[in-house]
Amino acid sequence: MRYKIQALATGLCTLPSYALGHSFGEPYKLPMPYWMYIYGAMAALILSFLILGFFYSADNANRPHRQILIATHRLRRIIQRLKLLTILQVLLALCFCLAIISGIIGSQDRYRNFNMTFFWISFALGACYLSAIFGNWYHYLNPWKLLAIKARNFNRGRYDYPNQLAYWPAVWLYMGFICLELFGNTKPFSLSLILIAYTILNISCIYLIGAKAWFRYGELFSVMLRLIAKMAPIHHCHTTQQLALRMPFSGLLHQRIEHRSLLIFLLFMLSSTAYDGLRETSLWFNLFWKDPFHILEPLLGQHPIYAYVMLRPWYIAFETLCLLLSPFLYLGLFLFFLWLGKKLTRSSLSVTELSLRFGYSLLPIALVYHITHYYTLVLSQGFKLRGLFSDPFGWGWDLFGTAISGRIPILPDMGFIWNSQVWLILIGHVASVFLAHAEALRSFSNAKQASISQLPMLLLMVIFTGAGLWILAQPLQG
């Protein structure tokens, strides 16, 4: 019986899913034992902490980060004369229109229809990576903002935005978006309906509270991409209209989270990606289906695996609940380690105030988790968009002569993928240690107190590093 259950569980674990599976596509053996990667990453974090403690002073922390202006007035005049931003905004809006139409009348094959690859891969993933490099491009090219520009009466809104709502609408939309991504099993037609519904939601909210308030607090992608853009090496200042180069992640220096709802949004960026990786591991699957605590079997009268069809909706509900609770679990960990730092330093700052000051130090981790988990999807499926433009409906067209050549995926060597993931995880955590240390030097009275306050935060970073690498390594060790 035990072996039958194990065989059935293994089979259920390998059920195929659309583009949400982002683990390795072929067997790969780690060149070194997993524990060596963990110890190496932890050692690098501790070493970076010691170096910062010795060489990075309060004067450095309080100094404005350097920027190099790269856009001249002449370049800006050329862009305005050619109406380049307007053209790009219209093109992006047309892509969304094509995605809606192709989902309604085109093939329902997820891989042949334009809208699935365009929205889930090229937009939902690619937009994040573009923002991490080129800054807040979405501020200028947002297709739903085009509606507000064309309907100028929408800009003012009919009601004042309630201050107590803050960023909660964006948090709720983000949670719904990730639930849809992980559990929605969307197809081209249903995705088109979702895009139509989201467009109606945007128009309604712009009409009620105005474009400025909605795109600052409510519209999911505006909030998410604006956060990611803070880490970009290319920065565009909306007020002075200046384009500048800066060190990556330096845009988070001297920044403070303005409301706890934005902190929850940021933590969900981190926790949802980690959870997506965790739910693909055998450990997570066995936690429910092998019933290690013997909770379900007495209730069902048989092992849960044999009631898979009946229990599947309950399993989805269980996973959804865990996903929605994940940012609050991360918040509890974050507040606990901040509280430890407060106790060690006897600081007069409240834990809430510390969380708002140090919250942005977690943003680099959220970014690198996102990249490590999903960039192989962009390479394997995202580059097929070139071919899908030639055959957006999946009808066998070849409008631009790219229908075949544009569908060849880029599949890097598995060793390259693993090593790049390790380095990205390490870089993100070192950046977070740096940002937290800089904020500590500004928040505490002296360097010694600042360093002591960061000992619990260093431990938290070590925990995050170990957990992140463990999740990434599971498909390689299974």
Image: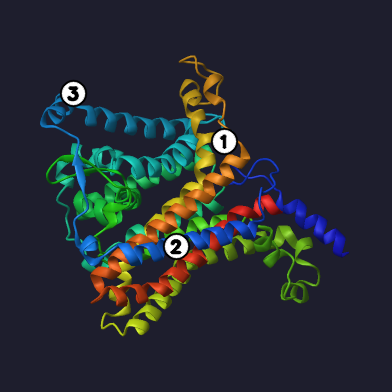
Residue that numbered label 3 is attached to: 82
Residue that numbered label 1 is attached to: 110
**Image vertical order of residue 189 relative to residue 215, above or below:** above
Secondary structure at numbered mark 1: loop
Check the image and tell me how it is coloured: rainbow
For the view shown, which residue lies furthest in the right direction?
1
2 vs 3, front mark: 2
**Image vertical order of residue 162 relative to residue 212, above or below:** below
- The residues tagged by marks 3 and 1 sit, at their Cα atoms, a distance apart of 37 Å
User: Label 2 sits on what residue type?
Assistant: Leu
Please indicate whether residue 406 sits to the left or right of residue 447 in the image.
right
Residue 97, horizontal then vertical, whole percent: 37, 32
Secondary structure at numbered mark 2: helix
Q: Residue at x 34, y 67 (%)?
A: 53
1 vs 2, front mark: 2
Please indicate whether residue 11 sits to the left or right of residue 110 in the image.
right
Q: Residue at x 38, y 60 (%)?
A: 432
User: Label 1 sits on what residue type?
Assistant: Arg
Decide which of 458, 367 is in the foreground and name it.
Answer: 458
Residue 246, horizontal then vertical, whole percent: 26, 45
Question: Label 3 neighbourhood size at 10 Å, few (<14), some (14-19), many (20+)?
Answer: few
Please indicate whether residue 52 sits to the left or right of residue 305 in the image.
left
Q: Residue at x 58, y 46 (%)?
A: 418
Question: Label 1 neighbourhood size at 10 Å, few (<14), some (14-19), many (20+)?
Answer: some
Residue that numbered label 2 is attached to: 47
Q: Quadrant of the N terminus?
A: bottom right
**Residue 262 seen:** no
